[in-house]
Image (spheres, grey):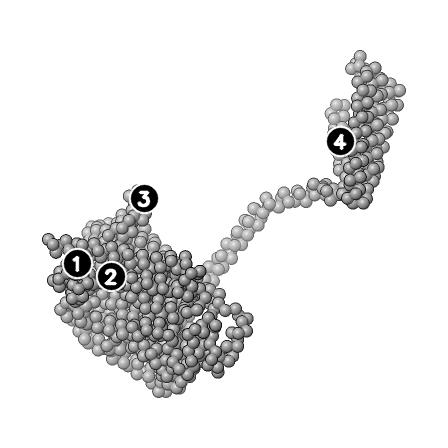
Amino acid sequence: MFQLIQQLTFHHKAEILAGLIPLFPLAAMVIIALFGGKILKGRAHVPAIIGIACSFFLAILLLLIFDVGQFNGIKAALFHVTAAQANQIGALSPEFLQMKFSTWISAGGFSIPFGVYLDPLSVLFVSFVTGISLLIFIYSSGYMEGDYGYFRFFAYLSMFVTAMTILVLANNFLLVYLGWEGVGLASYLLVGYYYPKRSARDAATKAFIVNRIGDTCFAIAIFMIYLTFHSLNFANVFYGPLQSASFRAAHQSMMFWIPLLLMFGAFAKSAQFPLHVWLPDAMEGPTPVSALIHAATMVTAGVYLIARCMPIFMHDLPVLHLVGIIGTFTAFMAATIAMCQYDLKRIWAYSTVSQLGYMFMGLGVAAGSAAVFHVFTHAFFKALLFLSSGSVMHAMGGELDIRKMSGLRKRMPITTICLLVGALSLAGFPGWAGFFSKDEILSAAMNSTWSGGPWLAVIGLLTALLTAYYTFRAFFRVFMGDLVLPQTAGLHEPSAFALPAESDHDHHQAHGADDPSQHGHDAHAGHGQQRNTSFDGPITMWGPLVILAIGATLVGWLGVFGGHGDQGWIQSFLARVPMNSGIHYVPTPPGGLFLPAAAADRLSPAIGMSIGGILAVAGILIALYFHLINRHAAEVVKSALRPLATFLENKWYIDEIYHYGIVKPLWYVGRMLYGVDHLVDGIVVNFFGYFPQFVGWLLKPTQSGRLRYYAIGMVSGLALVILGVLYLLR
Amino acid sequence: MMITHATSSFSDPVLVRYLALGAVLFAIGLVGFMARRNMIMIFLSTEIMFQGVAINLIAFSRYYHNADGQSFVIFLLTVAAAEASLALGLVVMLFRHRQTLNVDAWSDMQG
C-alpha cells in the first residue's frame, strides 16, 4: 500500500514535471522578447540557456522515472527511496500516463485540454530535444555573438523549443497541432533570420509553404479522427474503439485516409520525397538553426507523429508500407544528391533527408523502436556535424565550398576530431552511434514479414555505402590533405545586415586574408582569432562540440547493452510503446495490434550489422582513394559520368520540376484569373465609378466663376420658365 | 373692377408706355449686368433694373388707383439706398484685395 501511494505520487509528480517542461523556454522567450532589445542585449542568451537547462533537467528526471531499472542507484539517491522501490517506479509504469492541466477549448461536447501524455516515446523525445537544444543554445551564444538581432535570435530559439516540447508532450491531436504549427512558424522566422538576404527570405517562404501542404493534410486528418472517434485524445483514439474489428470495418475508408493524410503531414515536416525540397534550402538560416532543425526539433516531429500514431497505421498496412517505400526512396535519392554537392552544409542537409528516410523505412516495416533509436542517435551526430561545419564556416568567413578549402585539421584540431566523430557516426562506422541504429532498421527491414521489407533493406544497404562515401568525401576534402584556405579565412561571415556599400567591408574582403590583425566587423572584434593560431573558436563553441562528440560515440551502445535479456537499454525502454513488431520485440499487444513476428528464417542481427559495417568501411575507403590519395581520379570519374553528375548536382531537377510543373502553371492560372478579375473590375465595377465622373466633366464648365455667365444662366433659365408658363397658359 | 379689367389692362395705351419704359430700363440694366466687367458698372446696372421694376409698380398703382405700389416703391428706394452703401463698401474691399475693379479677377471663387 505504501509503495503504491509512493508510486502514484511519483507518476503524479512526473506529470506535473512534464507540464512544466514547455513553460521554461516559453518564459525565456517572453522575457527575451520583452527585455531583450533594451536591457539584456548581448546577454540575451542567459534566460534562454537557463530555461532550456531547467527543461532538460526535468526531462532527465522523467527519463529516470520511466527507466526500466538500469539506473536504480541514481533514482534511489535522487528520489530518496530504496533501490527496490526505485526499480518498481520504472518496472510498474503503466503504458502511458496522462494528465489534464486545464481546458483549452470547450464548445458543447467538444473539449480540448492542455494535457500531457507521457510514455517512453514522448519522454525520450523530450529529453533529447531539450538536451541537444541546450548544447545548441550554448554554441549559439558564441557563434552569434555580436550579430544584429542577437536577442531576437534567442527569443525565436526558445519559441522553437517550446513548440517542439508541446508537440511531443501533448495528449491530444489538436495540442500536437499547436506545437506542429509552432515549430513551423519558428523555423520560418529562423530560416529567414537574415531577412535582408533575398535567398534567406525565399528559403523561409519555401519552408513555410511546403510545410503548409503537410499541415493541411494533418489538419484534415485531425478532422477525420474527430469524426471517426469523437475524441482527439490519444488514449481514446488508440485504446478505444480502434481495437474492435467491427468498428474498423464500419470505418474502412477512414482507416485508409487518416493514416495516409497523417503520412503526408509527417512527410512535409520531416522532408520526405515529394515535400523534401524545403530542408536543403533551410540552411540559409544561421548554422545553429540548421543544427536545431536537423537534429532536435522540426524534422523529428514527423517521425514522432507516425511513431505515435502507429496503432492507426498498423490497421492499414498498405499505407504503412508506402511510408517505408517513400522513406527508402528518399534515403537513396538524397544520398545520391549529397554525393555531388559542394557546399558542406548542403551535404549534411541532404544527409538529414537521407537519414530521415531510414527512419521512415524503419516505421514502414513496423520497427518503431529502431526508427526512434535512429532519431535519437541522429540527433547527436547531426547536431555535431552541423555545429562543426558552423565552426568551419565561422573560421572561413562564411565560405563552405569544399573545393576551396583543404587540410583544415592543421588549423582546427578540435573541430576536426569532432567532425570526424560525427562523420563516423553518419557513415555507420562500427562502434559509432549511426552504426547501431541504422543497422537495426536494416535488420528489421530484412526480417520483416512483409515481402517488400528485404527489398527496402537492399536499397538501404546500398544507401549506407553511398552515405559512407559522401560523408568522407566531405571530410577528406575539407580536413585532410594540403592546407588550402579560402580568401575569406579568418574573417567573420559577412553579416547580412551590413550595408552593401560599406567601404569598410570591401576593404576587409580585399586585404583581410593577408592581414591577420583585421577581423570582420567591429562588433565581432571581441573574439577574433589569429590567423596562424587555432580557428576552433571560443569554448562556448567547441565545448558543446566535444560533449556531442562524446554523446555520438556513446549513445549507440545504448542499443546494445543495458536492457532486459539480450536487448539494449533503448529497446527495453521503448518496448512499452505500441509501435513495434519485428525481431527484437515481443510486444504486449492490446487487442492484437501487431503483425506476427516471423520466427523462422530470421537473419541474425549480427550478420546484418557486419554487412552494414563492411559497407561503411568500403564507402570510407572509396572516399579515401578519390578524395585524399588521388583527387585527380575523382575529376576523371566525374567527367566520365558527366550526365549523371550534372543530374545529381542539380538535385534530380526536382526544384525545376516543381517550378515548371507547379509554380509556373499556378502562376499562369493566377494571371488568367487576374485577367477575369480585370474584366469584371475594370468594366462592370468601374463603370459606376466613371459615370458620375463623366457627368461632372459635362457640367464642369458651368462653374467657371465668371459672374456674367451665372447671370446669363439665371436670365435664360428665367426666360425659359416664363416662356413655359406662357405656353401653358395660352 | 381691378380683377375684371386685368386682362384688358395692356390695351390701355398710357399704361403700356409706362410699362414699356420699365421694361426697357430693366432690359438695359440686365444687359449691362451681363456685359460689363467693372464692378461699379455692374452695380449701377442692378440699380437701373431696380428703377425699371419701380416704374412698373408706380404705373400699375396709378392705373388701379391703389397706393400699395407707390408705398412699395418708397420702401424699395430706402432698401436700395442701404444696399448701395453696403455694395459700394464691398466693392472697395474687393478693390483693395486685387487693385482692380474687374469682376473676372474674382472668378477663382467658383464653387
Q: Which residue is mark 4?
A: A718
Q: Secondary structure at mark 1?
A: loop
Q: Secondary structure at mark 4?
A: helix
Q: Looking at the picture, do discs 1 and 2 lie on one chain?
A: yes
Q: Secondary structure at mark 2?
A: helix
Q: Amino acid at mark 4?
A: Leu
Residue A299 appears in the rendering: no
**Labels 4 and 1: the sequence-earlier one:** 1
Decide which of A566, A643 is in the foreground and name it. Answer: A566
Q: Which residue is mark 1?
A: A93
x 76%, y 28%: residue: A722
What residue occupies the far left of the structure in this picture?
A1
x 37%, y 65%: residue: A45
Q: Is residue A220 left or right of residue A396?
A: left
- Label 1 and label 3: CA atoms lie apart by 34 Å
- Label 2 and label 3: CA atoms lie apart by 31 Å
Q: CB atoms at circles 4 and 2 under 8 Å apart? A: no
Image x and y of residue A673, in percent = 50, 54
**Labels 2 and 3: the sequence-earlier one:** 3
**Labels 3 and 4: the sequence-earlier one:** 3
Crowdedness near tag 3: few (<14), some (14–19) or many (≥20) residues, C-alpha within 10 Å: few
Q: Amino acid at mark 3?
A: Ala
Image x and y of residue A38, in percent = 44, 60
Q: Amino acid at mark 1?
A: Ser
Mark toward the viewer: 4 or 1 = 1
Q: Which residue is mark 3?
A: A107
Q: Which residue is mark 2?
A: A123
Q: Quadrant of residue A406?
A: bottom left
x 29%, y 62%: residue: A54
Decide which of B12, A80 is in the foreground and name it. Answer: A80
